[in-house]
Amino acid sequence: MNELVRLLSNFIRTVAIRLPDDVLTALKELSLRERSYWGKAVYSLMFDNIKLALEKGVPVCQDTGVLMFFIDAGTNFSYINMLPEAVRAATLKATEDVPLRPNVVEPFDERNTGNNIGTRLPWIEWNIIPNADYAEITLYLAGGGTSLTGNAKVLPPASGFKGVIEFVLDVVSSYGLNACPPFLLGVGIGTTVETAAILSKKALLRPIGSTNHNPKAALLEKIIYEKVCGLEIGPQGLGGSTTVLGVNVEYSARHPATLAVGVSTGCWAHRRGVIRIKSDLAYELPFYKGEVL
């Protein structure tokens, strides 16, 4: 248990301080494409910020968000029963050691718990993998600005994908500035608001530059990407030619009478990491080349 908590708390530290390799690569590529003076200036400040966070060992953003864990747990993973307790203990430890900003407020008490632990937080979303002997844990730090952009709506099917695109653009043009662009845009499609919303959040967990396996969904990603770029919101909302890190669409089958769409965003400091832990506690960090916990 102690070693599992140590691994997870150090993993949280890494996600808070170091941007994933794919995010850093995308930011570098966008900075080369940016045409506006102020956009280029913003990118320069971003890279200074990233460098200082690594040098000083402090979070890359002062808003370290609320911790959301998406766990693919193998039924033969030796520590599956310990994971909920280990996640909470690691959150407490990381809050003190990194440190993470206390961001958890109990809504009916209007009280900050002070330790990033609260009712149903940290959030844990489970997926069970039969006969596997590992757990793959994805951590997303959900900051305030990006969460303000989140929205979901159930459309009549007659709205079609034209209606989906219009809804996404309406959300982004209304609240996208809060998400500290260039942001990653996640779009979920399903039956109900909650399924569309969670799919849009899971879309943010995909590698930047990946495309949906369904060619039509991949085409929708491309269309939305081009239209959002056309808004020219630009880095930090100051105008420019680069607004999005990418657009990821995830979907489920739906009811014949509904077409639900959800929108989530991840800011330029898109703090999402994955750790795969085996039953012998060996681990892999696919988004952080060379990182040792």
Image (cartoon, helix red, strand yellow):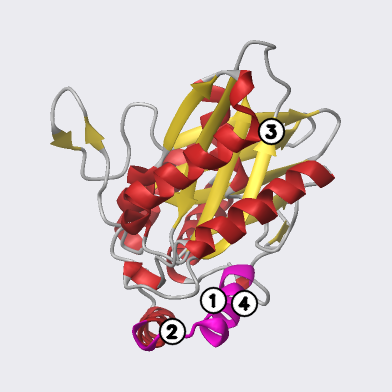
Residue 177 counted in the magenta span? no
Quadrant the C terminus occupies: bottom right
Question: Label 1, on which residue?
Answer: 27
| Distance from Cα at disc 1 to Cα at disc 4 | 5 Å
- State if disc 1 and disc 3 touch (CB < 8 Å): no
Tell me which label, 4 or 2, sits earlier in the chain: 4
Q: Position of residue 268 (x, y in %)?
A: 45, 66
- Residue at the spot 57% in from the left edge and 18% down from the top edge: 156
Q: Amino acid at mark 2?
A: Phe
Q: Position of residue 73 (x, y in %)?
A: 70, 35
- Residue at the spot 17% in from the left edge and 22% down from the top edge: 108
> Over which residues does the magenta segment extend?
22-38
- Residue at the spot 41% in from the left edge and 40% down from the top edge: 150
Quadrant in the picture for residue 47: bottom left
Q: Position of residue 143 (x, y in %)?
A: 36, 51
Question: Label 4, on which residue?
Answer: 25
- State if disc 1 and disc 2 touch (CB < 8 Å): yes
* Residue 151 shown left or right of residue 211 in the figure: left
Question: Label 2, on which residue?
Answer: 47
Instruction: Relative to 56, say whether 254 is above or below.
Output: above
- Residue at the spot 70% in from the left edge and 63% down from the top edge: 209
Tell me which label, 3 or 1, sits earlier in the chain: 1
Label 4 sits on a secondary structure element that is: helix
Instruction: Out of 134 and 53, give the one closest to the viewer.
Output: 53
Number of other residues with Cα within 10 Å of mark 2, as a class: few under 14, some 14 to 19, many 20 or more: some
| Distance from Cα at disc 2 to Cα at disc 3 | 34 Å
Question: Label 3, on which residue?
Answer: 251
| Distance from Cα at disc 2 to Cα at disc 1 | 9 Å
Mark 2 or mark 1, whichever is nearer to me:
1
Residue 37 counted in the magenta span? yes
Q: Amino acid at mark 4?
A: Thr
Tell me which label, 3 or 4, sits earlier in the chain: 4
